[in-house]
Image: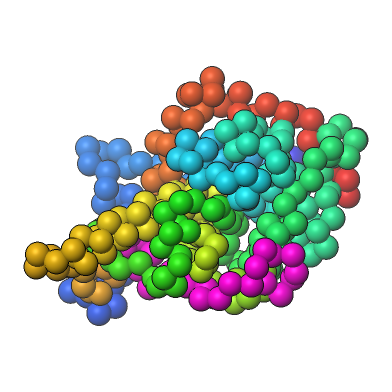
Amino acid sequence: MAVTKKHAGPTSTPGAVPGSKHTPHQTPLEAISHGGVVMPGIPTFPSYLEHRRHILVHMAATFRYFARNNFTEGQAGHISVRDPEHPGFMWMNPLGRHFGMLTAGDMICLDIASGRIVSTLRGRPHARTVNAAGYLIHSAVHKRRHADVHAICHAHSNAGRAWSVFARPLDMLNQDICNVHEHQAVYAQYGGIVFGADEGENIADALGERNKAAILMNHGLLTVGATVDEAGYLFGLMDRSCAMQLQVEAAAAGGGGMRKNVISDEEARYNFVMASEDNALYREAQPDLEYEMQCAGGEDRLAEGFETLAFAL
């Protein structure tokens, strides 16, 4: 039986935060857990099959979370997750199927390098297709960030698109947005609908080597993560923070002596170290994903169709 590469749990202790008076002595999950039991981080699996099932179920739950939060606009929006056994492959959602209806069996696997569909349904090719612009964006990022990025989320949410017109990063207005402190990018160009590889490469260039999120001018938001759980949670956080920034800017522009108080870089760096770690961000996503599973009728409902998936290698 194949054994998956195991994710490290919350075993290491963060060091001193550069430029900060804070020196953490606990991992993020140890710090947030009170009462003797530490919240579990990213799970491990005895086989690639079980790992893949977990990924695709959580991918489907993330899409349903996107649907519940109205991150939909026609056929726009896509999530990709790197396959645990074949790192040169990524799973994406089918084009034209509503986020709120997706299950694991709907997902389509592509070769990152060529775009060839490599998944089948019990020996038959998938009847659906994926978003061409999505493939170009996601493949460019996956090729550039193969070591740390295993999932990518992009959608045309209302607040994300509204804030994107300013081509400005988000201010550290509250402790939650510090999860992307010094790790957010702005792509301050608009090259039209992504039907050419160049625009995907430009977005990957803007995201850079370490950023967790990108604001794409006149387009929307993009987030990445070590898990689909992390990338999905960060997308929701970015969208809510865009809405909050728009509200704050409107209030400050209204006069009356209203002044923005922005979190200092020192405190924001500490917040980032203690909250924006892979295991901590995986845990942040679980309440919403568990809720989506419950609403769908259980995890097995979101796993529907998984047993029909196979590879045409």
Residue farthest to the left, as pictured: 257
| Residue at 42% from the left image edge and 54% from the top image edge | 159
Q: Residue at x 57, y 33 (%)?
A: 100
Q: Horizontal placement of 213 versus 312: left or right?
A: left
Where is residue 64? Give x, y as percent: 54, 36
Q: Along the horizontal axis of the image, is 209 left or right of 246?
A: right
The colour style of the image is rainbow
Magenta-span inclusion, residue 122: no
The magenta stretch spans residue 193? yes
Residue 227 in view (yes/no): no
169 w.r.t. 83: above or below = below
In the figure, 222 relative to 262: above or below? above
Q: Residue at x 51, y 76 (%)?
A: 188
Closer-to-camera residue (15/19) = 19
Name the residue at 35% across, 67% down.
170
Q: Residue furthest front?
A: 254
Where does the magenta region start and end?
177-199
Q: Residue furthest top?
A: 297
Q: Can you say whether 172 is above or below 27 in the image?
A: below
Q: Picture coordinates of residue 121 (x, y %)?
A: 83, 34
| Front one among 4 and 245 | 245
Tell me residue 213's x, y (percent).
47, 64
Q: Quadrant of the N terminus?
A: top right
Q: Is residue 283 visible?
A: yes
Indicate the position of residue 54 as horizontal and vertical percent values: 60, 38
